[in-house]
Amino acid sequence: MFATYTLTKDELNYEFLDNLKKMLDEGEIRLTIEHLDETEYLMKSGKNHEHLMRGINDARNHSNLIEVPYEDILKTANEKD
């Protein structure tokens, strides 16, 4: 059996482990932990790296910013799917 689970550290709890144990047959398992760094992944692509760096520089220099009224943010946050 091979399975990949992506979860937050808070989701890695006894309930998750108990459910995982119920899915497995007897014998040994291999558990590999990989910390996912989304920035590192995005930086692998040359275009993404350039885009991210430009955005970081814009934010630091307060240039090319888009202003969003606070009311619009609240409205969007309160919208239900």
Image (cartoon, rainbow, N blue to C red):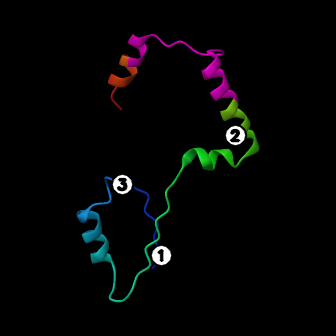
**Dot 1 corresponds to which residue?**
2
Q: CA distance from mark 3 to mark 2?
A: 27 Å
Label 3 with label 1: CB-CB less than 8 Å: no
Residue 70 screen position, x and y as percent: 41, 12
For the point 29% across and 64% down, the residue is: 16
Sequence-wise first label, 3 or 1:
1
Q: Is residue 5 above or below residue 2?
A: above
Say what amino acid the circle numbered 2 marks.
Asn
Q: The residue tagged with tag 2: helix, strand or loop?
A: helix
For the point 33% across and 28% down, the residue is: 80
Q: Is residue 36 above or below residue 64?
A: below
Residue 63 screen position, x and y as percent: 65, 15
For residue 70, side relative to residue 63 (left or right): left
Mark 1 or 2: in front is 2
Say what amino acid the circle numbered 1 marks.
Phe
- The quadrant of the picture occupied by the C terminus is top left
From which residue to which does the magenta span run?
54-73
Mark 3 or 1: in front is 3
- Is residue 51 within the magenta segment? no
Say what amino acid the circle numbered 3 marks.
Lys
Name the quadrant containing residue 57.
Answer: top right
For the point 62% across and 50% down, the residue is: 41
**Dot 3 corresponds to which residue?**
9
Sequence-wise first label, 3 or 2:
3
Q: Is residue 71 above or below residue 52?
A: above
**Dot 2 corresponds to which residue?**
48
Residue 50 screen position, x and y as percent: 73, 35
Q: Residue furthest right?
A: 46
Our reading of the magenta stretch's main secondary structure is: helix
For residue 7, side relative to residue 48 (left or right): left
